[in-house]
Image (spheres, rainbow, N blue to C red):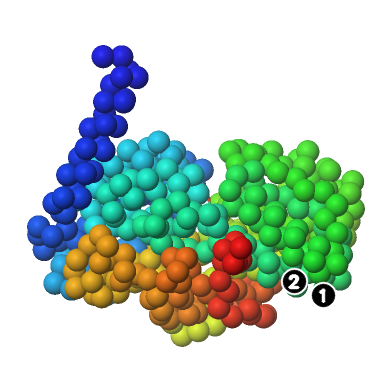
Amino acid sequence: MTANTRRTWISWAALAALGATLAQPGWAQDSTFKVGLILPMTGQQASTGRQVEAAARLYIAQHGDTVAGKKIELIVKDDTGLPDVSRRLAQELVIKDKVGVLAGFGLTPLALAVAPVATQSKTPLLVMAAATSSITEASPYVLRTSFTLPQAAVVIADWAPKNGIKKVVSLVSDYGPGVDAEKFFSEQFKKNGGEVVESLRVPLRNPDFAPFLQKVRDAKPDALFVFVPSGAGAAIMKQFVERGMDKAGIKLIGTGDLTDDDQLNDMGDGALGVVTAHHYSAYHPSDLNRQFVEAFKKANNNLRPNFMAVGGYDGMHAIYEALKASKGEGSDALLKGFKGLSFESPRGTVTIDPETRDVVHDVYLRKVERKDGQLYNVEFDVVKAVKDPGKAPK
Ligand code: PHB
């Protein structure tokens, strides 16, 4: 057998096994409900894996591991950030482990690679991290507790022109969420009378921001709008300050991925005053959030939870509630249990839109400030119950 025919044979075998899984769902056979958590635990997106896993474990520790008569078992797999690995792991989790839900997904291409496995095996796929608008349309079994880029991009595009920012250069990572951020920011900003003089896209893997920042300097905009994925914000912030862009009068704005709580406190004073829009700040002033942040730090060597952690924490909550609603049944009954869920989260009220299966939540405007000796995203305004603008009626 050549490598190619072997691969084809394996994927046919996998599909056949998925069919068998359908006929005899694993979840019905025993009193355990398995959650397959597929995350990048190593590689460039490892901070996302660490945050989501820690949050899922915290939720289970706080709420017990028995739901609707089933014992919850978390199976964590490292996809190293590669879509082929995510898909293979998902097939194994469905066929061998008979998981009742596939969850996690630290990057858009990883979630998209697994969507066909969810459809084929009728297994709900809960996106806890990735944020391109279209992911929920890749399979009727996809649900989301993270966020979408258009939700945040539109809110900052409404704020900027009212606050003296008329001319902007945008800079985004060149893949799904970056393209969403660029499109929804610039459309809304232009609608509000603003001008986007240049739209720059940087590679996702190991970007060198220097030549792009030089272009920004030459264009002399009022502000630079940035989207880079969680974990990449510190690098661009450092170069922005080193090149004296802030001193040259160019403001930095973006979606909250830029001032990620996982890195923010180490970004230094250059981050002070940066305004972003996002659904979660570790500084969100609610009792529920204060308790969450304290418990998370205690369980994780003082690590501050970021917006990925809240996606994982709320995702586990959604799994518990959906499983209660389905009385412990999986597949289509469980999928139904997710739709329309609404609950209080450390971020505020979260709803899973029953039509789009996407998350609806409040989006906050925040400014980086020093509080109690640490850098935080301090919220100063809010837009309530924001649906994904990427799914506005066509
Ligand atoms: C994504 O790949 O969908 C993604 C990852 C990290 C972010 C936002 C979006 O911060």
Q: Circle 1 sits on which residue?
A: 162
Residue 61 can be seen in this image: no
Q: From the viewer's perspective, tell me whether residue 382 is left or right of residue 40.
A: right
- Picture coordinates of residue 19, whole percent (x, y): 21, 44
* Residue drawn at point x = 63 percent, y = 54 percent: 180
* Secondary structure beneath label 1: helix
The residue positioned farthest toward the front in the image shown: 394
Q: From the viewer's perspective, tell me whether residue 98 is left or right of residue 268.
A: left
Q: Are marks 2 and 1 in contact (CB under 8 Å)?
A: yes
Residue 65 can be seen in this image: yes
* Residue drawn at point x = 32 percent, y = 54 percent: 102
- Name the one closer to the observer, 25 or 262: 25
* Residue drawn at point x = 76 percent, y = 53 percent: 170
Q: What is the total number of numbered labels drawn onto the structure image?
A: 2
Question: In what quadrant of the picture does the C terminus appear?
Answer: bottom right
Under mark 1, the amino acid is: Lys
* Secondary structure beneath label 2: helix
Q: Quadrant of the rendered structure where residue 201 is?
A: top right
- Picture coordinates of residue 190, whole percent (x, y): 81, 62
Question: Where 152 sits versus 137, above or below?
Answer: below
* Residue drawn at point x = 52 percent, y = 64 percent: 147
- Picture coordinates of residue 132, whole percent (x, y): 55, 54
- Picture coordinates of residue 251, whole percent (x, y): 80, 61
Q: Quadrant of the rendered structure where residue 278 is?
A: bottom right
Question: Where 133 sits versus 323, above or below?
Answer: above
* Tag of residue 331: none
The residue positioned farthest toward the bottom in the image shown: 287
Question: Where 184 sits versus 200, above or below?
Answer: below
Q: From the viewer's perspective, tell me whether residue 165 is left or right of residue 310.
A: right
- Name the one closer to the observer, 370 or 11: 11
Q: Circle 2 sits on which residue?
A: 158
Under mark 2, the amino acid is: Asp
